[in-house]
Image (cartoon, grey):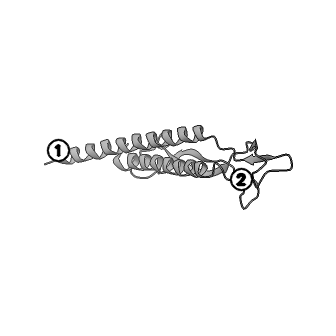
Amino acid sequence: MDFFSALEILTSGMRAERIRMNVSSSNLANAKTTRTPEGGPYRRQKAVFDAVNAKQGEFVPSQFENALKRVEVTGVERDTTAPRRTYDPGHPDADQTGYVSMPNVNMVEEMVTMMTAARTYEANLSAMRTLLNMAQRSLKIGK
C-alpha cells in the first residue's frame, strides 16, 4: 500500500466518524422535541456506513484492489422504533389521556456513540500522524 492509498483510507474513516458525531449530537439536541414539521416527535437518526474499494489506479497494485477498503457514508436513516409514551397531562402535546409521545432517543446510547466516534477519529488521526512521520523519515534517508 502506498502513501496516498493509506491517506485516502484514513481520511475516509475520519470523515465518516465526523458525520456520525454530527448525527448523534443532533439526536441529543432533539431529545425533548415533541413537535416536528413532519408531525409527531423527533425520530432518532443514525449514519449508515459501507466499505467500498479504495480508488484504483497507478498507486494500487491489482492484487490489492479488492483488499483495500475505505469507509463511505451511504446515508442517514431514521430509527423506526416507536416513540416513548410519557404521562404528562400538563404538556401542550399531551393527548386526551394525558400521555405525550417523546422522541425515541436514548441519552446514554447517544453519549456512548459520540465517545466511540471520538475515539475512532483519534485512532485514525494517530495513524495519519504515524504515516506522515514515516514519510518524512523516508525522505530524509536520501539526504
In the foreground, 31 or 125: 31
Image point (63%, 40%), residue name:
106
In the foreground, 35 or 3: 35
Image point (79%, 48%), residue name:
89
The quarter of the rendered structure image containing the N terminus is top left
Q: Most extreme residue toward the front, as rendered? A: 90
Image point (58%, 48%), residue name:
28
Mark 1 residue type? Ile
In the foreground, 90 or 60: 90
Q: Mark 1 Cα within 10 Å, few/some/many (few <14, many 20+)?
A: few
x, y percent for residue 116: 49, 38
Mark 2 residue type? Thr
Q: Are marks 1 and 2 in contact (CB under 8 Å)?
A: no
In the foreground, 137 or 143: 137
Residue 67: give its label. none
Residue 141: give its label. 1
x, y percent for residue 121: 44, 44
Alpha carbons under labels 1 and 2: distance apart: 62 Å
x, y percent for residue 102: 72, 47
x, y percent for residue 41: 72, 52
**Quick check: 70 left or right of 127?**
right
Q: Nearer the viewer, mark 1 or mark 2?
A: 2
Image point (77%, 47%), residue name:
100
Which sits earlier in the primary sequence, circle 1 or circle 2? 2
* Residue 54 visible in the displayed image: no
Q: Most extreme residue toward the bottom, as rendered? A: 37
Q: Most extreme residue toward the right, as rendered? A: 96
Residue hosting label 2: 34
